[in-house]
Amino acid sequence: MGAFVTLKINDKLYLKDPVETELGRKIVGQSVVLIDKMGFELFTFKKLAQVCDTTEASIYRYFENKHQLLLFLTSWYWGYIDFKIEYGINNIRSPRQRLKLILKIISEQQVNDLNGTFLSLDVLQKIIVSEATKSYLVKNVDDINKYGAFAEYKNLCTRISKAIQEAGPKTRYAKSIASMLLEAARQQQFFAEHLPGLTDIRRNRTEETTQFLEHIVFKLIEE
Amino acid sequence: MGAFVTLKINDKLYLKDPVETELGRKIVGQSVVLIDKMGFELFTFKKLAQVCDTTEASIYRYFENKHQLLLFLTSWYWGYIDFKIEYGINNIRSPRQRLKLILKIISEQQVNDLNGTFLSLDVLQKIIVSEATKSYLVKNVDDINKYGAFAEYKNLCTRISKAIQEAGPKTRYAKSIASMLLEAARQQQFFAEHLPGLTDIRRNRTEETTQFLEHIVFKLIEE
DNA sequence: TCTTAAATGATAGTAATACTACCAATCATA
DNA sequence: TATGATTGGTAGTATTACTATCATTTAAGA
């Protein structure tokens, strides 16, 4: 896969499609590195312009502001994960096995299989862990939701919810369980790294997060 | 309870204890209202000074910056919740009933039983839902964690984790389950309000969140 | 009551942020 | 060769996030 993934992203998530141009891809690629380095709060378009050898004005031609860029990045990531799941579960018969694979994909360490693409998946995943919730925890969430800014995330959540229902048709609260798992995957990873007192998962042990998710999901589903 | 709750907060969470002075209490009380109104990103000390009829400089005498204020508010809230749980489960014999009460307290709509106090609990709870994760999702999380900024949250999490162990001694991943529940309580509430496609809980139905948490926790614990 | 220290007010100033506007230069294409 | 799209470069503005200084008020103790 990797090199030939081209995700179509909601065109409200940019002013001008960054994937289409050299500069656009550079902006997106470098933004991931920079946000990872300094955190979203200290990240600015001015600093991004410097590392891209371009100007602030040029970046503003692609994205209205840094929050829109964050929406773009998160949507891209969730779109990628959703694609990976779709591709992966395609030929798996057992609903329980499908669910297992889904949990693995949403919680495992992503290796950079995007050779030749404009962004490195492993760094993107790092910023997803610590910054993705900021994409929706904003005052104008309802406005940006209206034009479909969270479509990729919802798709993914719906897919997981369906997989839960297939593995356990009588399971209650399937949607809530799906979103809880999706959030928990990142959250427990963050806690393991920074607030270890809040989790049983150990640092740099993403496989333990997968195990945790499996453990709870198979107790929650009901046939 | 209410009127006589005096929580001792880590003194690294302020420059000068706001609870001690008239102005300090006004700052804290109004900050909650203002953050609720405009969201944490648009909230500034200048605007806060205006509604408090004071100056920016005076506010900076209490808090280093708005993030420290957020840490203060969240710590105060978790301290309060922890106190409420301690007080509530005191005379309950059954571990399962204790656990039930805990889930209720962390997920139910808080009524403002703090008459005569400087802040309104119901509004504080609203901002906890949408802003609390921002207290730890910052680049310098490790530094602020070192001086105990998250002590109240950890205490609460540990208490819940223990309650889980008491209700189900063989339960695995008790800490992770505790933090997951604590986060899910707010998260599902936020989704119900703003992104209903991600949850089974309906708007303004906090009792459904409680039911959801109960449903899953009693499937997860093992005797 | 006088004195002193603490708390607040008032004002000013600085560096950085988050943009917007404008025009010139380049580049691809018809 | 003309045209339009893309980018560069510069400038400017309002706001943010502070810090510093000094005057005034208030509270508390001798």
Image: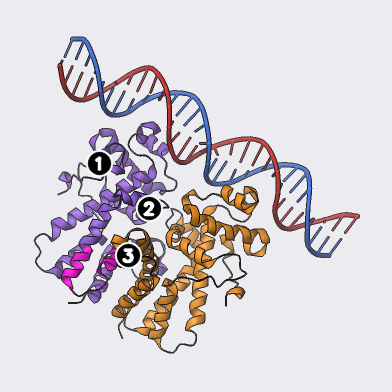
Chain colours: A orange, B purple, C blue, D red
User: Can the viewer see residue A104 in this picture?
Assistant: yes
The answer for which chain carries disc 1 is B
Nearer the observer, A142 or B216: B216
**Rendering quarter of residue B91:** bottom left
User: Can the viewer see residue B55 in this picture?
Assistant: no
Q: Tell me the residue at 50%/63% (across/down).
A: A123
**Is the residue marked by circle 3 packed among few (<14), some (14-19), or many (20+) residues within 10 Å?**
many
**Rendering quarter of residue A118:** bottom right
* Residue B203 spot, x, y in % from top left: 34, 63
Q: Which residues are magenta?
A: B160-182
Queried whether the magenta region covers residue B164, the answer comes back as: yes
**Is the residue marked by circle 2 packed among few (<14), some (14-19), or many (20+) residues within 10 Å?**
some
| Image-based side of B108 in relation to A177, left or right | left
Quickly name the residue at label 1: B118
- Locate the N terminus of chain A and report the quarter of the image it occupies: bottom right
Task: Give the amino acid at mark 1.
Answer: Phe
Nearer the observer, B169 or C2: B169
* Nearer-N-terminus badge (2/3): 2
Q: Considering the numbered disc 1 on the image, is that residue within a helix, a strand or a loop?
A: loop
Q: Tell me the residue at 64%/48% (across/down).
A: A55
Quickly name the residue at label 2: B141
Nearer the observer, A209 or B146: B146
Task: Give the amino acid at mark 3.
Answer: Ala
